[in-house]
Amino acid sequence: MRISQAKAIELLQHGEVVAIPTETVYGLAADASNEAAIAKIYAAKQRPADNPLIVHIADAGQVNEWTSEFPPLAQRLAQAFWPGPFTLVLPAREEVSAAVRAGEPTIALRVPAHPVALALLNDSGLGLAAPSANKYTQLSPTTAAHVEAGLGKDIPVLDGGACQVGIESTIVSVHGDEWQLLRPGMIDASAIAKVAGKPAMQQTLAHTPKAPGQHLLHYSPRTPCFLFASRQAMLQDARNHAGAAALLFGTGPSVTSKDLVLPDNAALAAEQLYSALHTLDAAGANIILIESPPPEAGWDALRDRLQRAAYAPDPQKD
Ligand code: TXA
Ligand code: MG
C-alpha cells in the first residue's frame, strides 16, 4: 500500500511500521524508542530477536542521545561519511531500549543520504529503527515493488524511487581509537582507513561486537544460486544446467539463454544488483549461475553479498 509522507509520519508516531526509501535499500522503519513498535519490525521480518537493528538519525548532533561515547575517531568518520551508506556501532546509553539493540551493549547508528528519509527523520522528530524491508535471509528490496513482493501488499510503503547505492551500508564499530569493519559496503576499507589515519584492527577482542549478518545464507533469491570463479568455468558447467539463468559482469560470451549482464563498474553494478537478482528469481530458472565479480577491492561488498546469496547448506552437515 503506497502512502504519503504525512501518512508515514502519522503511522510512525503511532507506533506502526512503514517501509521507507534510503539510498542503500528500503528499510522497514519504526520509532526506535517504542518497544512495541520495534516488536512489529521483528514480527514482520520474521527476524530472530538476537539480531540488532540500525537506528537512523537526522544528523550527527543526535549521536549522543543514543551513545555513551562518541570518540574523536568516530566523529571524524561521521563527518566524512554522513549522510551516507555508513553505519557506526558505538557503546549504547543504558536507557536505549534493549529491543532495538537485541541486548547488545552497543548501538548501530546511521544518517541516510536519501532526501525522503532525511525529511521523515527531521519532520517526525524520531530516531527510526530500520532493517532492510525484506523477510529474514531473503533479498533486500531496492524498489517499493520489491518491498510489496516480499512483505505483501498490505505493508505501508513510502515510495522514493529506486535506491541509488543499491546494497546495504558499510558497518564499522569504533572502540576508543580503534575501528573494525563489521560489514563491507560501498564505502570501502581503504576510504575509511584514510580518514581514520590507520587500518582496521583485525583481532577479535572481548568488546568486538558480534559480526552482523552472520548468517551465511543471507540476501538469497528463492532460486538456488551457484557462484563461479570465472566466465570460462561457467561456460563449461552451463551445459549441465538446462534450465539455468546467469548473472554476468561486463562483456564476454553469453552463458545461458537467460543471461543478465551487469556493468563492469562496481558502483553501477551495486545499484542494479538486487534488482537483477529479483528479476532472475522471477525468470523461472531452476538455478542461477553467478560470475564472480572482478577481484579488485572496489568490488568487495558485491563479492560479499554474492557469496552469501550463493551459500548452499551442506545436506550432509545440516
Ligand atoms: O543500508 C543499511 O544499512 C540498511 C538501510 C535500511 O539502512 N539497513 C540494513 O539493516 O541493512 P539490517 O537490519 O538488514 O542489517 C543491519 C545489520 C545486522 O546484520 C545487524 O546484526 C547489525 O547491522 N547490527 C545492528 N546493530 C548492531 C550492533 N549494536 N552491533 C553489531 N552489529 C549490529
Ligand atoms: Mg538485511
Image (cartoon, helix red, strand yellow):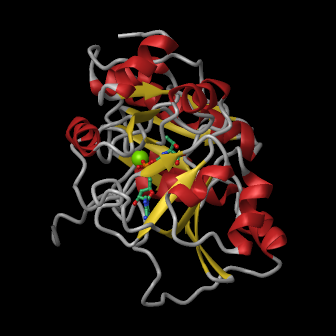
Q: Quadrant of residue 105?
A: bottom left
Above or below, comparing residue 189 to residue 222 in the picture: below
Out of 86 and 213, give the one closest to the viewer. 86
Can you give x and y, in whole percent of width and height, for residue 233 in the image? 55, 56
With 194 as the anchor, is 66 left or right in this view?
A: left
With 286 as the anchor, is 296 left or right in this view?
A: right
With 237 as the anchor, is 195 left or right in this view?
A: right
Out of 127 and 277, give the one closest to the viewer. 127
Above or below, comparing residue 8 to residue 277 in the picture: above
With 97 as the anchor, is 244 left or right in this view?
A: right
Q: Which quadrant is the N terminus positioned in?
A: top left
Can you give x and y, in whole percent of width and height, for residue 226 in the image? 42, 51
Residue drawn at (45%, 62%) of the image: 107
Can you give x and y, in whole percent of width and height, for residue 92 in the image? 45, 67
Q: Which quadrant is the C terminus positioned in?
A: bottom left
Can you give x and y, in whole percent of width and height, for residue 59 in the image? 66, 45
Q: Is residue 152 visible in the rendered structure shown here?
A: yes
Q: Is residue 292 visible in the rendered structure shown here?
A: no
* Count of all numbered marks drawn on residues in the image: 0
Residue drawn at (32%, 38%) of the image: 223
Residue drawn at (60%, 51%) of the image: 62
Above or below, comparing residue 306 to residue 25 in the picture: below
Q: Quadrant of residue 150?
A: top left
Residue drawn at (63%, 31%) of the image: 118
